[in-house]
Image (spheres, grey):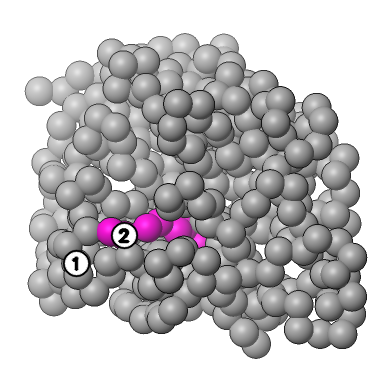
Amino acid sequence: MRKICLFVFLGCYSMAACHSAPRSKEEKVLYADSVRVVKSGLTYPWEILWGKDGFIWMTERGGKISKIDPKTGATLCFLALPDVVSRNEGGMLGMVQHPGFAGNGLFYVVYNYKSGPDYLEKLVQFRYENNVIKPVRTLIENIPATTNHNGSRLLISSGSDPKLFMTTGDALIQANAQDLSSLSGKVLRFNLDGTIPADNPFPNSPVWSYGHRNQQGLVMVNGMLYASEHGPTIEDEINIIEKGRNYGWPVVNGPCDQAAERVFCRTNNVREPIWSSGGSTIAVCGLDYYNHNRIPEWKNCLLMVMLKDASLKALKISPDGRSVVSEQTYFKPRFGRLRDICISPDGKVYLCTSNGSGGDMLLEVVKL
């Protein structure tokens, strides 16, 4: 049975396929009985999240949003956004669902687009209803973008007054990161309707923290916000993101351990990372927190996937969450570049690759 949903999006006609599809033989293969291929034939997936409806939601950099059955790999519905412009690392990026998604169908997506000659980034709210995805409103736009360093992960905090966090890269203009008038190189914080919270640190500004180079992982654990950030040629980082703090870029790489860095850190309220990669980069990306018994080796760990290092790193955190006490690396280099990770409520772990040419996969970790 096949049902095709045709709808109008921003004045253009887009096709959404809402159906169940048989799995290919490849999608039934187990890699040494440890990893299952849920879906293959993908092209640069960027975000995977476990939806509040029990399905995996995914973005692909070229402009596609998909709802995927994690058991069968079937694409249940998809939308190709016509105004997404993908340039190298740019295109469709982060996605997060509204806390009330199960009832209101609202979710948020960040993507790059063109306005005249300018390459830019915006945050848009969408609604999923009756197997159709429609835009609701643009919350913020005209953020500088380029072929690299665009961020952007999204996260919504829990609690009675949830807030929407968004990371932005420096758009290859290093000075943006320290410029509070620029939205590049920042963590931004909004109310869920896109307005600026009254308790943000800088009046009438969505800026929550600054001095960032390119953050592509974001997770909140026990009220503490962690971000993974790309370094230049050294010092990829994991930071605890705090209100109004400066994270040092472009003057500081990693900890404040050089003479010039120490001076800058003392005078500019710099928050040092809780972990860094040291004298090389591994291209850190998607970040999540594992606290289940299903894979006991990963309990109380930040799980971070990597592009250049083509692996997953399990970073066990201290009881207070303020330091990393041990680390282990997995899957290197079995699947190539890994872009994102998500965890189901029952502790299943899913990964997506980022190798291109239609050869990317959505994977489930069955066991270690």
**Alpha-carbon span between mark 2 and mark 1:** 9 Å
Image quadrant where residue 17 sits: top left
Q: Look at 40% across and 56% down and name the residue there.
A: 288
The type of residue carrying mark 2 is Tyr
Q: Main secondary structure of the magenta part?
A: strand
Q: Nearer the viewer, residue 186 or 169?
A: 186
Say which mark, if any, is on residue 290.
2
User: Circles 2 and 1: CB distance less than 8 Å?
Assistant: yes
x and y percentages locating residue 72 in the rendered image: 13, 44
Magenta span includes 323:
no
x and y percentages locating residue 190 in the rendered image: 63, 30
x and y percentages locating residue 169 in the rendered image: 70, 52
x and y percentages locating residue 57 in the rendered image: 34, 38
Q: Look at 21% across and 54% down and name the residue there.
A: 347
| Number of other residues with Cα within 10 Å of mark 2, as a class: few under 14, some 14 to 19, many 20 or more | many
- Against 162, residue 226 (above or below) is below
Magenta span includes 289:
yes
Residue 150 visible to an observer of this rendering: no
- Against 256, residue 53 (above or below) is above
Upstream in sequence: badge 2 or badge 1:
2
Q: Secondary structure under badge 1?
A: loop
For the record, the magenta segment spans: 283-291
Image quadrant where residue 147 sits: bottom right
Q: Is residue 328 left or right of residue 257?
A: left
Residue 294 visible to an observer of this rendering: yes
Q: Look at 70% across and 31% down and name the residue there.
A: 199
| Number of other residues with Cα within 10 Å of mark 1, as a class: few under 14, some 14 to 19, many 20 or more | some
The residue wearing badge 1 is 295
Q: Is residue 215 left or right of residue 311?
A: right
Q: Is residue 120 left or right of residue 346?
A: right
The type of residue carrying mark 1 is Ile
Question: In the displayed image of the protein, which residue is found farthest to the front?
Answer: 320
